[in-house]
Amino acid sequence: MKNLQKPSWALLLLFILVTGCSKNSSDITPPLATPQTDPTPSLVAGTWTISSYRQRTEDKTSLFTGYSFVFKSGGVLEATLNGASTRGAWVYKPAAVTYYGSGSSNASVTLNLGAASPLSRLNRLWNIDSVNTTSSKLALVNPEPLDDEHIDFSKQ
């Protein structure tokens, strides 16, 4: 009688392990994904001016006095001063979450407005430091710490 009970307990234990460890597909939590909606149209729609441009301890805002910037669909960026326009490009990259403790990246925007000064100062990748939709301000920071550059755009 003992010989018949041992295999029954072993089969019961095997059954519990197999059914207890399997997961239903609805029990599996998918990894975090980048949102499918692109927030850039709401961030950049309209006309902007540079209300502050600082490099290290120097205020260089006056370099951009009178300029207006329009971020258009399709990655077109247009800077206008006294009726003369310079056409360039912009690319938005959303923040990304990485796994296993390696950190995350900031949302960023890359600007390219050609070689003419002072617009060439804006040609680089900028991290989005903050967006204030109430006051219509967009703060960008150069990710290179030695450059120590900060730009504040104000929506017009």
Image (cartoon, grey):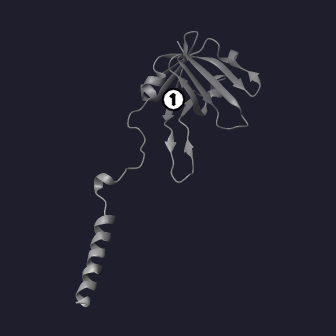
- Residue extending furthest top? 82
User: Residue 137: x and y, percent?
Assistant: 56, 19
- How many circles with numbers are drawn on the protein? 1
User: Residue 27: x and y, percent?
Assistant: 32, 53
With respect to residue 12, does 84 lie above or below? above
Whether residue 104 sits left or right of residue 24 in the image: it is: right
Q: Residue at x 26, y 78 (%)?
A: 11
Label 1 is placed on what type of residue?
Answer: Ala
With respect to residue 103, does 79 lie above or below? above
Q: Nearer the viewer, residue 54 or 28?
A: 28
- Residue extending furthest right? 57
Whether residue 19 sits left or right of residue 59 in the image: it is: left
Q: Is residue 77 visible?
A: yes
Label 1 belongs to which residue?
A: 89
Q: Is residue 115 visible?
A: no
Q: Nearer the viewer, residue 12 or 137?
A: 12
Q: Quadrant of residue 23?
A: bottom left
Q: Residue at x 64, y 37 (%)?
A: 143
Rendered-image quadrant of the N terminus? bottom left
Q: Quadrant of residue 125?
A: top right
Q: Nearer the viewer, residue 95 or 54?
A: 95
Q: Nearer the viewer, residue 133 or 72?
A: 133
Q: Residue at x 61, y 34 (%)?
A: 124
User: Residue 134: x and y, percent?
Assistant: 51, 17
Whether residue 56 sits left or right of residue 102 in the image: it is: right
Q: Secondary structure at mark 1?
A: strand
Dot 1, how many residues are within 10 Å of its Cα: few (below 14), some (14-19), or many (20+)?
some
